[in-house]
Structures are given as structure tokens and as C-alpha cells.
Amino acid sequence: MAKKKPQKIIVTRQPAFAEYVKEVGLAPEGVEVTDHATVDSVKGKHVIGLVPVYLAAHAHKLTMIPIITPPELRGAKLTIEQIREYAREPVNYETKIVD
């Protein structure tokens, strides 16, 4: 029996980032998007975005897409065109809590 894929959630404060994630096929239309993640919202899910390690440790998997912007754009709302220009290849992580 095939393993069920974990539910996906996009965590971002950049609306264009969520659009880009769907555009490149990492998440389907209608996927949950939030700008504020909690342990409960990420637990057991495939998280796409940037979250603190303590939250990533509760996720099934974390996919980060590095967005390498010039210094003058750091912290700014980016357009979809800027996301496309500055996005790099996605990187997948699995984290866990250890003693």
C-alpha cells in the first residue's frame, strides 16, 4: 500500500512567493497559505517557506526556496517577476528534535 503524502502548507508573508510556489508545481491551487505558522499548523505537514527550526522539527518535511535579493530589496514586498528572477532551486530538509 502506497504511503499517503503529507498535506502541504505554504508559510510566507510574500503573496508573490505563494503564487510562485504554485506556478512551479511545488503545491496545488487551493493549498493552505499562512503568514503565521504554529506547531499545530505545521505538525506532520510538508511546509514550503521559511520557519524557525523549532517549528520545522514538527513538520514532516520543509522545502525552502532561497530568494537571493540585492540588499536594497531585503525586507520589501516582492513582485512575482522579482521572485522569478531571484529564486534559486528548492532545498528539502527533514529536522527532528533530539535529546
Image (tube, rainbow, N blue to C red):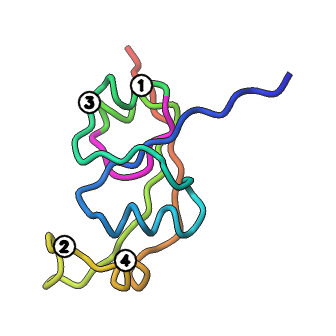
Question: Which residue lies at the image location 33% right of the left edge and 70% below the top edge?
Answer: 16
Residue interval drawn in magenta: 45-52
In reply to whether residue 46 is colored magenta, the answer given is yes
* Left or right for 69, reference 87: left
| Residue at image mark 2 | 77
Residue topped by disc 1: 43
Between discs 2 and 1, the one toward the N terminus: 1
Badge 4 or badge 2: first in the primary sequence? 2
Rendered location of residue 86, percent (x, y): 38, 81
- Residue tagged 4: 83
Quarter the N terminus occupies: top right
Question: Magenta segment: does it hold 97?
Answer: no
User: Seen in the image, is 95 located left or right of residue 50?
Assistant: right
Q: Amino acid at mark 4?
A: Ile
**Mark 3 or mark 2, which has the lower sequence index?**
3
Q: CA distance from mark 3 to mark 1?
A: 8 Å
Tell me what residue is drawn at x 38 percent, y 31 percent.
42
The quarter of the image holding the C terminus is top left
Give amino acid for label 2. Lys
Categorize mark 4 by other alpha carbons within 10 Å: few (<14), some (14-19), many (20+): many
Residue that carries the numbered disc 3 in the rendered image: 38
**C-beta proximity under 8 Å, tags 3 and 2:** no
